[in-house]
Image (spheres, rainbow, N blue to C red):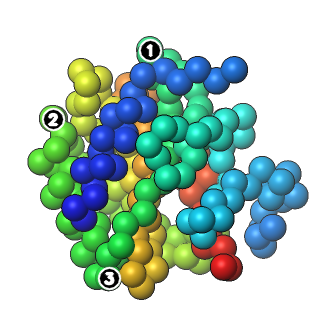
Amino acid sequence: MKHIIRVISFVVLTFYAVTCNGQPGVDKDQDARRHVEKTGGFSFVPPEDWKVRDFPGLKYKIVVGPIGAGFASNINVVDERFKGTLDDYVKGNIAVLQSAFKKFRLVRQDDFKTSAGLQGARLIAESEQNDMLLRQTFYFFGTADTKYVITCSTLAEGGEKLDPVFEKSMKTFRFEKQ
């Protein structure tokens, strides 16, 4: 969990607008759009019309969506070595998020299951970052010794409209056979 601060700083980096010049039950179009991170051993289908981009300082590519009011909605993934339970990892992250962000408000916390049956957790929170009120949905998944946090960020005002978009994309998250 000591690396969660790095996660937070990467989220801060994505605040400003970014210029943008097969699994059972997934249709072929979705499977063709599947983004695979071979070094991370995972994949997911980004929201339709969102762009996959490199981002300096991040291990994995980010997915960039609609830009509004100087902010690009985005999805980024980080991983961290952690041998505890996913529940313990989520609890520790909540504590860090509460202390790291101004006006932090936990909107919702629940279990989350992908279409393939991978069990995870979801947190939806709002907080002020760089004088912007953001809505962020954190999806947590894990293996025995590594935990993955997928952060889906958008502006808080109207941000709930992207909840189903983020959920649909994260329902496709899976670990790839290495």
Local crowd size for mark 1, using a 10 Å CA cut-off: few (<14), some (14–19), many (≥20):
few
Please, which residue is most extreme toward the top here?
69
Local crowd size for mark 2, using a 10 Å CA cut-off: few (<14), some (14–19), many (≥20):
some
User: Is the C terminus in the top left, top right, bottom left or bottom right quadrant?
Assistant: bottom right
With respect to residue 133, does 58 lie above or below? below
Picture quadrant where residue 176 is located: bottom right
In the rendered structure, the answer to whether residue 43 lies left or right of residue 9 reads right
Label 1 vs 3, first from the N-terminus: 1
Residue pointed to by mark 1: 69
Label 3 vs 2, first from the N-terminus: 3
Are circles 1 and 3 on residues that touch, CB within 8 Å? Answer: no
Q: Residue 99's spot in the image, x, y percent?
A: 12, 48
The answer to whether one can see residue 111 in this image is no
Residue pointed to by mark 2: 102
Q: Nearer the viewer, residue 25 or 175?
A: 175
The answer to whether one can see residue 4 in this image is yes
Camera-nearest label, 3 or 2: 3
Give, as a three-letter code, the residue at label 1.
Answer: Ala
Residue pointed to by mark 3: 83
Q: Residue 65's spot in the image, x, y percent?
A: 59, 32
User: Is the N terminus in the top left, top right, bottom left or bottom right quadrant?
Assistant: bottom left
